[in-house]
Amino acid sequence: MILKKRRLPPLLVSFSVVALVLTLTSCSKSISSTETLSAITPSGADANAGSWKMIVLTGPTQISVPAPVATTDPGYQSELAAIKASQGILTDAQTSAIAYWSAGGTLRWNEILRELVARSDLPPSPNADGTYPVPSATNPFAYPTFPFSNPPYAARAYSYVSVAEYEALKVAWYYKFLYNRPSPFKLDPAIKALLPNSNLPSYPSEDAVEAGVNSALLQLLFPTAVDEIAQKAAEQEQVALLSGRATASDIAAGEALGKAVAAIFSTRAGADGMKAAGGNAALWQSLADNTKAKGEVPWVSQDIPARPPMLPIFGQVKGWMMSPTDFVNERPGPPPSTTSAQMQTELKEVKDTVNNLSRDQLATVYKWADGVSTVTPPGHWNSIAVPYVVAGSYSEVRAARVFALLDMALHDAAVGCWEAKYYYFNPRPSQLDPSIKVQTGLPNFPSYVSGHSDFSAAGADVLSYLFPSGASYFAVQQQEAAMSRLYAGIHYRSDIQVGMDHGKRIGEYTVRFAKTDGAN
Amino acid sequence: MMMNDRDVQRKSKSGCGLERVRNVGVLMTLALCFIVSPLLRAQTAEDGIMLARQRLCTGFFYSHESWDHYWEGSLERMNGNVGTVTTQSVLWTGNYAATNKLNVLATVPYVWTKASQGVLHGQKGFQEASFAVKYKLISLPISQLGALRLIGVFSAAVPMTDYTPDLQPLSLGNHSKRIAGRATLNYLGKNGVYMNGTTAYTLRGNVKLDRSSYYTNGQLYFSNEVAMPNQFEYTVSTGYRKNDMTIVGSFTQQQTRGGGDIRPQDSPFISDRVNFSKVGATLTYPIPHRRDLQYWLIYSNTFDGRNVAQSNTFTTGFLYTFNFERKRATP
């Protein structure tokens, strides 16, 4: 009997090993790093997009695009022949590239941008003497690499890329319908259409416009990624050609257009106040002194060693839909005094909340943490827009409009929020009560008003205008994002409530523009 | 029949023998390292000796682990935002010998963490429960000197709660299901000479986070799911063990077969490439006049590594052995 027993276990063991290995391997699969997007077939051509209202440019003809040669031209005919030759020898890599870009360049470039933001979203390590080095745009590869794409930097970067791309595509649409050159696959039946076909005239190539404008601005904003950005742009242009959508001359004209628009935005970016946004030691001290003079407790960095405040002059950076006066006019009223009974009540609420979190509340904290090494809250709202853009089957120019409007509002929210944060220089809960410990990284800037709340209200406002069917979902996301900061122990309730009101008012500036931009 | 088995003969004299306790001890030590270096896993049954049949060896350990230096990639540094990180735990463990060849082990750890500086909130809760089946494949008497054994172990670990692994380095662990296969070669001399070599390979299941994207190893992943690289580990140990008294020193290395480095000033991430070398010592001592009760003290130090804390760990506890065979035999 004992003998029998002793025979059985090895069998049981091996059986259970096999069963467990199967269980584990079945839930263990590789994770795709890119967004899973299928090919988009635009539901409309948006033929009038060349007349939609511009934001920075004066009009489409501010960029000149020369007329293309006739399709009977021998040079053009040899371009068609080159497409046919290439389509005959497609490599696997080229086929996957076609599938990748078939989701639409606007969505793919937005995804690339989010990745660049997350990669650069790292605060510098302290020096041995307790000071911190500052990333340098003129020496971007040296540590700390440029940029540190914290939320304000990221908000600005998303907006520059999205707005410039939108402007460039409106220009492209203007010339497409001015010159009306058909796609290669329409002109020559031997050329296959390997991408969804929208009957869009092919000159200048919208893919090349996107490649030109995105690569130029991304290389300005994220200079250390110069090689991979160039490679992505080249790949998108190659796909335009291989897919039978554009010839070499369509692509050359598109890229030139995209780069010309990017140059205008680069100039704007060089003079929008960002370079001075970090301030200096004297300014940091004056912020504290001014707050003390008002009888309030000034914010101090709780990083160890103490870190200079994040971009204290970002509130002076140029907005898209708001003037400097608008930002001052929209500035929220003051927070509860640091010595007031209300502040004590709010402080107690923070402590009680962070020490008694439910698992759901904790999940909300992490869902919306969007701290170091992430796409940041503005990027999170870009991600939220993606499925709506996909479901809309938008033309490239209409898809670009979504991100341009959203990112303008998010940038303006960043400027307005930072203006308020450094105007009031209000301490975090964990500064007023050091017994408060937080559930996510503590941002290194003043508390009032909450950036998450400001961004999320502005983002939800614009997206609700663009996608009314999603309005209740966006509202839930906004509430979650905002409240996650109370759960995490890093914001008072008034930071959150006032921040949401502020973000909503800022979002309305963009919505008012969108209502009259000619795209409705 | 059993008299032919020298190991069992030798062991059956005592209560909670070195072997099963040591199993637990090593498991324990690693379970604690795991807390700091999320990619370590709780191990079981590293030694090559079996608990004699129908005995249950069980008890509790308390462990205290702390560190103020860690390797950010391969850069050794401190971080003022956490200061000294302390992880304490209480661990229940049990080892039941179904037969002389087959032991079944289980552990349940409760863990709490805190940082001495900065503002991060400490975490507390149950971590991964682990189960192991340990099977003696070969036992070879070597003349009159001692015996050589080959042991195979299969183990699995499952998170007991839905704690978040996303607040490194203060999270309780990395919340991954794990299975591991282990082979151990052991020599135990009649004169007390103890030599042990053991190696294990661990497969880890994907982990789901509460967020929709994460950046690691040079890439942004648009997913809430994280693929966890597998891990390889070996330990050699040697020392003295006789009459349930043990003094053993050990050396362990672990390699993670993939994963990224902690980036400058970033937090660790659950799928990082965690490698380390550590040394340790284990002392076991049978309580006089209570042969079935045994005192344990374990120390370990991680002295080299990558994406891991430079931790010192002290573990102490008592184990008691119940002998069901004896009881049954006595009318």
Image: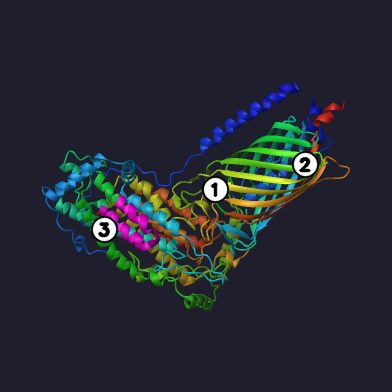
Q: Which quadrant of the view contains residue A401? A: bottom left
Which residue was labeled with disc 1?
A360
Q: Which x, y percent locates residue A192?
A: 22, 39
Amino acid marked by disc 2: Leu
Q: Which x, y percent locates residue A171?
A: 22, 57
Residue at coordinates 32% horizontally, 64% vertically from top-left? A321
Residue at coordinates 40% horizontally, 62% vertically from top-left? A413
Q: Chain of mark 2?
A: B
**Which one is in front in this view, the residue at disc 1 or the one at disc 2?**
2
Specify the label residue A258 is tagged with. Answer: 3
Q: CA distance from mark 1 to mark 3?
A: 45 Å
> Which image quadrant: the C terminus of chain B?
top right
Q: Nearer the viewer, residue A345 or B32?
A: B32
SS class, disc 1: helix
Predominant secondary structure, magenta span: helix
SS class, disc 3: helix
Residue at coordinates 73% horizontally, 46% vertically from top-left? B238
Residue at coordinates 27% horizontally, 65% vertically from top-left? A264
Which residue was labeled with disc 2?
B18
Amino acid marked by disc 3: Gly
